[in-house]
Image (tube, helix red, strand yellow):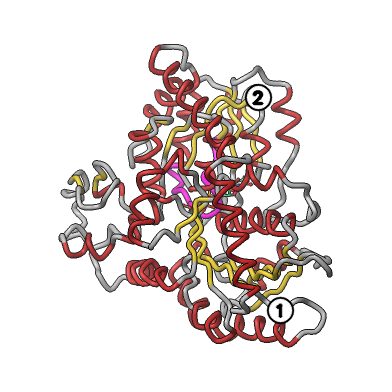
Amino acid sequence: MDGVRGHALLLPFPAQGHINPLMQLAKILIANHFVVTFVNTDFIEKRLNNKSSEYMSFQSFPDGLPPEHGRTLKLPELCESLQKHGPFHVENIVEKIMQSLRVPPLTIIVADGVFSFTQQIADKFGVPRVAFWTTSACGFSAYYYMPLLIEQGYIPLKDDSGSCKNDVISCIPEMEALRVKDLPSFLTVTDAEDYMFQYLLREAQNTHQASLVLLNTFQELEGPVLRDLNAKFGNKVLSIGPLLLSSACYGDLIADTKSSIWNEETSCLEWLDKQQESSVIYVCFGSIAVLSDEELVEFAWGLEASNQTFLWVIRPDLVRGSSAVLPGEFLERTKERGFFVAWAPQIKVLSHPSVGGFLTHSGWNSTIESISYGVPMISSPFFAEQPTNRRFVDDVWKVGYEMRENVLREEVEALVRKLMNLGEEQGREMRFRLKILKERAVASVKVGGASYKNMQDFLRQMQMKMKIGN
Ligand code: UDX
């Protein structure tokens, strides 16, 4: 394997919103003459079933949970089990690579930001650890400033009455006018011993030990927050996104590698081809969020009343505790203008000219994908740093509308109509802002752009560390 610049081990948290950006990074590394070992859990690997190739090998390890466990539907249990079983198995995988004569020695570990346990492994084998937080910069900043939010008494919440949810937080630099309700859901709990509260508090602080911090965002979008993070992390925070755009710039040496843990139903693309330009609202709540039966029905009747054409992703596990059952009358009334899939080729959908709006849960990948293709959003966050993303989408970047916590069909109808009929003044301004952000996203990953430069800097630092053998 002459000309190989290095060997990177990539380890995402086993969830779709973490696997996708790490897979996009893998494509870029391989296109830049790095060899990649991609490590998933057995549960994920069985669903992706990827075959190793000359440039990329796949390894996996047991997450310690029984096959029938809900995993991302029971996040604290998944996180706890990975903390218990991950170190042993990942160390074994690294050891085998180091002892192998068939692949170049590992020169770097790029681990999910929530897997700081890899630091000890990296230190043992003398390779740098890079922390890749798959959240937005604003989302990571909220996690990073948890000690300050605790000291100022904002978190944990004094009670769950919601009385403080509109309190404005002014102590986090560059996070203008954040309200308590905009904080990641893992922070707005009443019990300081809550597992996820302690988990994120610890993992965010452990990021200081990493050699570099990667974020899938771009300077022109989150510049102020990135500047503050770099002031706190000694300039080792690199914004290298949107990775979906930069990875598309390279030839696809791993074209047949799967990233989606569900099967993408491409039938919706042919259906989109038959629709008018910008006439379809795409409705999707990511890979983990779950709705109650009532919420599902409220979204359904709101979409029906909006009289808009829609493409709706109904994952098999979308409704808490049961499969999604949509009212028969709703299906009858919308059969001419509604299309349903269990899982969509989302990037192809968002880049399709017929899609004019996105009703989203504000997961970071969905958000940056929507911005990258200039699609305005309705933000209906559920958990994690989705509330923080919503705040920035709706009130800082002003490229979306905020949906209130309690889903009501009347509000769904009103917001969908507003989003899809952006002809009036406010709509034109929003579309203009999106056009600018989309252009800046594309420019950032092209030669001369900030993300392009950061990526080259990252590759150079990776190679340098390989050269000096640490
Ligand atoms: C999770 C958290 O929710 C999110 O807040 C965090 O930033 C990342 O981890 P997830 O809920 O899955 O992510 O949402 P998101 O970040 O949007 O990632 C979903 C990914 O799956 C996106 O890349 C999207 O393109 C893809 N997707 C989603 C599909 O390919 N098809 C679908 O039907 C739905």
User: What type is the residue that disc 1 sits on?
Assistant: Pro
- Viewer-side label of 1, 2: 1
Q: Is residue 36 visible?
A: yes
Q: Nearer the viewer, residue 331 or 57?
A: 57
Query: In the displayed structure, would residue 238 be above or below residue 389?
Result: below
Q: What residue do we see at 40% from left, 50% from top? A: 226
Most frequent secondary structure within the magenta stretch: loop
Q: Nearer the viewer, residue 227 or 412?
A: 227
The quadrant of the rendering that contains the C terminus is bottom right
Q: Is residue 458 left or right of residue 381?
A: right
Point out residue 219 in the picture as x, y percentages from the top left corner. 46, 43
Q: Nearer the viewer, residue 170 or 427?
A: 170
- Local packing at callout 2 (Cα closer than 10 Å; few below 14, some 14-19, many 20+) is some
Query: In the displayed structure, would residue 93 be above or below residue 153?
Result: below
Q: What residue do we see at 48% from left, 16% from top? A: 421
> Which region is colored magenta?
283-295
Residue holding disc 1: 105
**In the rendering, which numbered label is found on residue 353?**
2
Query: In the displayed structure, would residue 240 be above or below residue 44?
Result: above
The quadrant of the rendering that contains the N terminus is bottom right
User: What type is the residue that disc 2 sits on?
Assistant: Pro
Disc 1 to disc 2, C-alpha distance: 45 Å
